[in-house]
Image: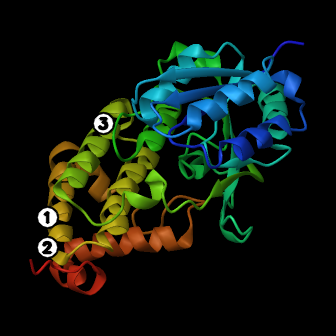
Amino acid sequence: MDKLVTVIIPCYNAEKNIEVTVQSVLEQTIGPEKIHILLINDGSSDGTLDKLEHLQTAHPEIITVITQENQGVAKTRTKGISLTETAYLTFLDADDILEPHFIENLLSVAIEGDFDVVSAGSQRKKYSGEIVKEFKVKKPDAEWAKWILMSSWAKIHRTQFLKEHNIRFLDSLFGEDAYFVLSEIVKGARFKVLDYIGYTWMLNPESMTNTRYNGISEYNSNQIMIMLESMIDLGADWADDDLFSYFILKQAVNRCLSPGKYATPSEFMRHYKRTIALLEGKYPQALHNSLIFRGPEGEEKFVRYAIAMFVIIHRLKLMPLFSKVYCKGKVSTK
């Protein structure tokens, strides 16, 4: 039976959890005979490669193992796309799991509706089993729905579309997933967003996602500027589109507020000024978007309020005062 979907799993020092992750794929209700699992060892320094080779030996008709020097998750996922031969693919982090019906549910929708991307919700869970948070689009049929959950995982992607349009991940500390999905949007991918949670994002305090926000260092700020500039350039033909403009503003505000909470006021202000200067110089439409104070249909109320308040505080020139109240980082006395 021909394989229908490839599950691309980048693995870096993943020996603790990779077997559980792979087992969640093997137990998919669509049947393992329709799945190809591509495990890419990204220069691990622990026993990951041994675990991967053991899994391949146990399931040679399903699992392929590739090993390489460390290149980072963006380049590793992009390599996975180039190696994929099935009609569809999905991404899975090495410490996460797929719910049993994930592939069957998304793939059936993709095939029946001829969609290039089918997107599901996800849940964040502790290893104790406690669900910390659910991420799901409240209005999946709204035009804004495809702009909300900007992860590459928890989705099924048509391989041919990715290859024809050279869709790649941004090689940056921040925004590699959002850049990837934005690329699909601006290249005209046909999206379908489902009211279904099929991906479990395990809360691993040692993972990159959970450790990279510890303030706003100059390096982090530089990486965020690269991310924003790259996204603006990517959507050059969409510059006058209100949804694209709101998306860029949302990214800019989020990359100020999320790391800024753990920064010092001076770090926050330095990064905020760089962000505003970038937007004013490269894409001023984002700061004067018609959706700023009401938000697109389907956006979370909290997000709409946060963006609107950020812009109001900016226009009233009250950001220095805001930073002193909001920022929790401590100034070093050394």
Residue 6 visible? The answer is no
Q: Nearer the viewer, residue 199 or 59?
A: 59
Q: Would you say the residues marked 3 and 1 are in contact, meaning their CB atoms lie under 8 Å apart? A: no
Q: Which mark is residue 230?
A: 3
Instruction: Please name the amino acid that badge 1 sits on.
Output: Arg
The residue beneath circle 2 is 266
Left or right: 7 with respect to 235?
A: right
The answer to whether the residues at label 2 and label 1 have Cβ atoms under 8 Å apart is yes
Quadrant of the image occupied by residue 15: top right
Left or right of 117, for residue 316: left
Against 125, residue 101 (above or below) is above
Location of residue 10 in the rendering, given as x and y in whole percent from the top left corner: 55, 34
Q: Determine the CA span between mark 2 and mark 1.
A: 6 Å
Q: Is residue 155 visible?
A: yes
Secondary structure found at label 2: helix
Q: Which residue is mark 1?
A: 270
Q: Nearer the viewer, residue 116 or 222?
A: 222
